[in-house]
């Protein structure tokens, strides 16, 4: 400790003692103090602190000095100065983006400033810099060109950030990260980011736990700070402070981003403007969040992209009587709105899974490769918790699909407000979800319920999301907590998208159709065994019943209007199950006797 610092410490200690004893300390002026060095230090520190604001005056002074030197020693160099000035201005105008002049107006300002400085310097070299009106021109021109510099938003932001981060040692000590240091800082369009090296023994989790204290120490708004680990080093992190929220407004959906289920879906945008892409092929997905958090919007975006895929069939379950999925009915191959329909749909999905698995085993293959002739099957379930309470049989089938559906391209996409283990059916569904989207949740513990155990501690703070549509995504390709906002697909957009893609939806492949037929026949056997069999009479009675159902089916198709007849009406008319109806319709369609007017509506062809 230096002598002056020890003296100041002793003076402060003596002053405290005097106040404790009731004695007011006196100020004594000494003639021994040297004010000139102190004044120089204060001026130097102030000049350095405001070096960015004083830069135009510094440039003007250097320009004047340079003109004097050239006029005194090399007055004939003025043509060289002009040539160099023109070359530098041209390079800045066309290649200024290489030196972080990203906007054309910034490159134009830099080129114009160089031309003014070079022109004045060349003139001062040829004649005396003190020759009027050169001094006045330098002063007036310097002030005029300084105004854009002083007003530039990015420059002011950079200066503010530099001054804030200069105090990092005090900030780190205040929040409990003593010893950490700033390695670099970058100002971007929405705020700034800094790379921080942690002290020995400190972890990224320690810094995440101190986020509220960091926001207070940095003078940022609540929820503005983000911390992301740097995979290469365990003691490095990136601190980002969002000063202007890039997701303050909704982002309009630009339309489908894929034409195949094998391509990654584009769900929205991260805060840096990069797209959020994730693949759903051979992956189950979980979408969670409170009501009003944007969960339905995320489901609509998924549906919008899947509807444009000619190699994916979509089945939907919506036990709220179709409030969410009914607008997509023309693109849904099947839509269940009651518990009974949901159980039948999930049973058929398992039958398709088993049929595809048997076919792959016979071919010696291990995975089902989707295509227009062999589409993937995506089962989208809105509000999965309702399914658990009202259709427990469907939940058992969902558990089977979650465990065995990946290889045969049978995928689950489940949406729910709070996916607790009870709400997810006490099975393997939640643990098998590879892709997890968490919109805003109310409680901190819900973060781990949606994204997985320990995610809250690792910085996945979806309970702090402050607008509908904002979400965090956890997937194999997204293992760092980055805030994003999903696209907004309104009701009119849903109707236009569904109408555009409904005519191009694929039919089920022959393997799946055969699997449904086999399952339907197996389901009829127990009922047949309970019927009284009295020789040929019982056999003829069953045959008459089947013929009656077939005749009723064909009569309904023949009498249908141009809009067709729905699957539910055919079930009521024939008294048969959905699988039987679907199988018979596929047979009529292959024989060109029936055609599908729209999703879920059929009629006989005009030639039949």
Image: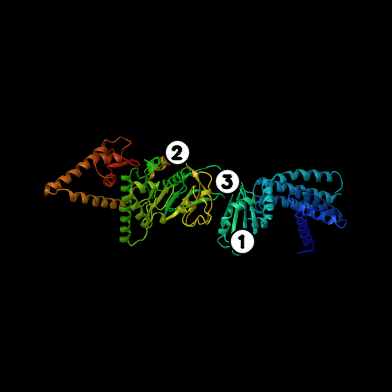
Q: CA distance from mark 3 to mark 1?
A: 29 Å
For mark 3, what is the residue? 246
Of the pair 507 and 293, the residue shown nearer to us: 293
Instruction: Locate residue 585 relative to residue 306 in the image: left or right.
Output: left
Q: Which mark is residue 198?
A: 1
Tag 1 secondary structure: loop
Task: Give the camera-side residue of 130 and 1.
Answer: 1
Which residue is under mark 2?
491
User: Where does the image place residue 379, in percent across and percent down from the top left?
Assistant: 37, 49
Where is 596 relative to 16, above or below? above
**Residue 294 spot, x, y in % from top left:** 48, 44
Query: For the residue carrying disc 2, how many other residues have a C-alpha within 10 Å: few (<14), some (14-19), or many (20+)?
Result: few
Please name the residue shown 61% across and 64% down the image.
200
**Of callouts 2 and 1, which one flags the residue occurring earlier in the amino acid sequence?**
1
Examine the rendering and report whether any part of residue 604 can be seen: no
Q: Position of residue 486 (x, y in %)?
A: 50, 46
């Amino acid at each position: 400790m230096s002598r002056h610092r020890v003296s100041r410490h002793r003076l402060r200690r003596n002053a405290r003692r005097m106040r404790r004893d009731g004695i007011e300390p006196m100020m004594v002026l000494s003639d021994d103090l040297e004010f000139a060095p102190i004044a120089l230090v204060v001026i130097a520190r102030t000049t350095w602190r405001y070096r960015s604001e004083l830069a135009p005056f510094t440039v003007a002074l250097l320009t004047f000095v340079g003109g004097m030197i050239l006029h005194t020693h090399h007055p004939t160099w003025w043509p060289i100065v002009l040539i160099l000035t023109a070359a530098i201005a041209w390079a800045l105008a066309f290649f200024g983006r290489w030196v972080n002049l990203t906007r054309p107006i910034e490159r134009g300002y830099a080129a114009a400033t160089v031309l003014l400085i070079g022109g004045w310097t060349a003139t001062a070299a040829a004649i005396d810099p003190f020759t009027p009106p050169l001094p006045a021109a330098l002063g007036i021109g310097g002030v005029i060109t300084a105004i854009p510099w002083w007003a530039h938003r990015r420059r002011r932001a950079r200066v503010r950030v530099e001054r804030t981060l200069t105090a990092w040692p005090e900030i780190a000590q205040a929040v409990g990260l003593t010893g950490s240091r700033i390695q670099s800082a970058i100002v971007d369009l929405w705020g700034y980011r800094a790379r921080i090296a942690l002290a020995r023994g400190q972890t990224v989790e320690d810094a995440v736990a101190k986020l509220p204290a960091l926001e207070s120490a940095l003078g940022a708004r609540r929820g503005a700070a983000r911390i992301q680990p740097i995979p290469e080093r365990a003691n490095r992190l990136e601190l980002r402070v969002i000063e202007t929220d890039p997701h303050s407004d909704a982002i309009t959906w630009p339309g489908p981003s894929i034409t195949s289920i094998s391509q990654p879906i584009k769900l929205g945008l991260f805060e840096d403007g990069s797209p959020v892409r994730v693949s759903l092929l051979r992956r189950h997905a979980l979408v969670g969040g409170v009501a009003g958090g944007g969960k339905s919007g995320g489901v609509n975006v998924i549906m919008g992209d899947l509807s444009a895929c000619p190699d994916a069939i979509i089945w939907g379950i919506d036990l709220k009587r179709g409030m969410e999925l009914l607008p997509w009915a023309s693109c849904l191959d099947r839509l269940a709105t009651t518990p009974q329909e949901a159980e039948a749909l999930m049973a058929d999905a398992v039958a398709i899974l088993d049929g595809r698995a048997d076919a792959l085993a016979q071919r010696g293959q291990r995975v089902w490769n989707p295509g227009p002739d062999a589409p993937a099957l995506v089962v989208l379930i809105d509000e999965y918790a309702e399914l658990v309470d009202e259709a427990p049989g469907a939940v058992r089938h969902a558990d089977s699909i979650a465990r065995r559906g990946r290889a045969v391209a049978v995928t689950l996409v489940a949406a729910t407000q709070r996916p607790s283990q009870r709400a997810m059916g006490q099975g393997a569904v939640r643990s098998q979800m590879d892709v997890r989207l968490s919109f805003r949740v109310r409680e901190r513990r819900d973060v781990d319920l949606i994204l997985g155990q320990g995610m809250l501690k690792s910085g996945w703070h979806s309970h702090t999301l402050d607008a509908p549509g904002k979400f965090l995504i956890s997937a194999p390709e997204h293992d760092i907590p980055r805030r994003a906002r999903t696209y907004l697909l309104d009701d009119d957009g849903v109707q236009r998208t569904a109408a555009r893609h409904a005519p191009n939806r694929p039919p089920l492949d022959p393997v799946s159709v055969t699997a449904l037929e086999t399952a339907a026949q197996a389901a009829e056997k127990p009922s047949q065994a309970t019927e009284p069999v009295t020789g040929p009479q019982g056999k003829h009675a069953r045959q008459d019943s089947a013929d009656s159902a077939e005749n009723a089916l064909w009569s309904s198709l023949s009498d249908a209007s141009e809009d067709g007849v729905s699957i539910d009406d055919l079930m009521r008319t024939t008294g048969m199950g959905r699988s039987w109806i679907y199988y018979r319709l596929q047979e009529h369609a292959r024989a060109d006797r029936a055609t599908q007017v729209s999703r879920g509506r059929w009629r006989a062809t005009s030639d039949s």
